[in-house]
Image: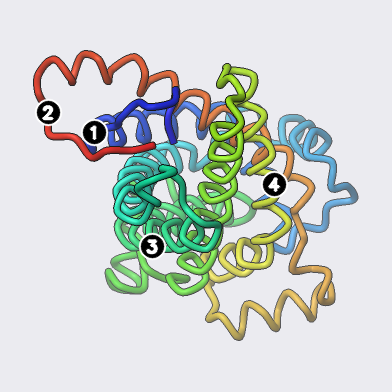
Amino acid sequence: MVSSEGSEKTPLVSLIAGGAAGGVEATITYPFEFAKTRVQLHEDSPTRNPFRVIKAVIEKEGPRSLYKGCETLVAGTVLKDAIRFISFDSIKSAFKDPETGTLSPLRNLMAGISAGVVASTFAVTPTERIKTALIDDARHDRRFTSPLHATRTLIAEHGLRTALYRGYVTTTLKQASTTAVRLGTYNILKDFERLRNIEQTTATTFANGAVAGTVVVFVTQPFDTLKTRAQSVKGAGVAEALKSVVDDYGVRGLWRGSTMRLGRTVLAGGILFTTYEWIAALIQPVLDKKFVPRVKAE
C-alpha cells in the first residue's frame, strides 16, 4: 500500500503511519463502534439506525457515555494497525511478482490473514476484551471506573489469561478475516489501478478504503458478533456464544449490528487508508535521508 507508484516503504514508515492512521480512525468513528457493541450485547433496541441509538444513549446517559471504553480501543487500534500494516507490507513484499510488482488475490488474502493473526495476538484481543467489558458494564453494574480499573478487576477475578484473552479464538477469526479482506481488497484495487495508470489521488484512496470497508462488514460480521458475546463481562465460549446469538435472534442474528458497523467501517476504511498514505508520504523522504534500511513495497 503506497501513496504513489514506484515508491518504497521502510518498516519504520509502515509502523508509524499505520499506528497514527489507526488512532485517528478509531477516535473519529468510536460512537458507531459503541452503538454496534450495545446492540450486540442483548440490547433490545427498537432501531438499527446508529444515529438513533447514539441519540438515545446521549439522552439517557449523557454524551460522555458514547466514549466509554474509547481510550482502550484507541490504544489497541494504534498498536493493532501499526502491527498489521508493517506485517502486511513486509509479507507482501516477499510474495509479490518481481516483474509486475503485484500479488495474486490469493497471496493478498494470505498476507492479510498472517498479519491479522499477529495483530490479534499482540494487540487486538486484550484491548477488545477490556473495551467490550467496559461497554457491557456501563449498561448495568457500572463497577469499572477506568480501563485500568477494569483490567485490574478482571485479572483479580479471572486470572490474566481469562481476563485479557477471553474470546481469543473468535477475535482472531474476526481479525484475520478482516485484515485479509480489508487489506487484500484495498491492495487488489491499488494493483488494478496502478497497472492501468489510474492516478492515485486522495479521493481515489478514500474510495478504495470505503469499498474495502464495505466488503469487510458483510464477509466478517458473524465473527464480530461472536467476538462481542464472548468478550462481554460474563463471557462465553465460541459454541456458547453461537448458541446464545441463534437462540436470541436466529441465524440472521449473526449479522446483528452490521448496519451500524457498516456506517463506521466504510468511513473508517476511507479515513484509515487516506491517513496512512498521507503520513507515509510525509515521513518517507525524511527517513530516507537518514538511510533507514528499507523493505521494498509496490
Q: At numbered mark 3, what does the secondary structure look like: helix, strand or loop?
A: helix
Quarter that holds the C terminus? top left
Mark 1 and mark 3: span between their CA atoms? 19 Å
Residue indicated by mark 4: 261
- Contact (Cβ within 8 Å) of mark 2 with mark 1: yes
Q: At numbered mark 4, what does the secondary structure look like: helix, strand or loop?
A: helix
Mark 1 and mark 4: span between their CA atoms? 32 Å
Residue 42 sits above or below residue 101 on the image: below
Amino acid beneath label 4:
Arg
Residue 212 shows in this picture: yes
Residue 100 sits above or below residue 10 on the image: below
Marked residue nearer the N-terminal end (2 or 1): 1
Q: In the orientation shown, which residue stands out farthest toward the front?
A: 99
Amino acid beneath label 2:
Val
Residue indicated by mark 1: 10
Q: Residue drawn at (28%, 17%), measured in percent from left and top?
A: 283
* Camera-nearest residue between 277 and 140: 277
Residue indicated by mark 3: 114
Q: From the top left corner, tell me how far across and down residue 274 is, in percent.
A: 52, 24
Marked residue nearer the N-terminal end (4 or 2): 4
Please rate how many residues cluster around mark 4, counting C-alpha atoms within 10 Å: few if below 14, some from 14 to 19, many from 20. many
Amino acid beneath label 3:
Ser
Marked residue nearer the N-terminal end (2 or 3): 3
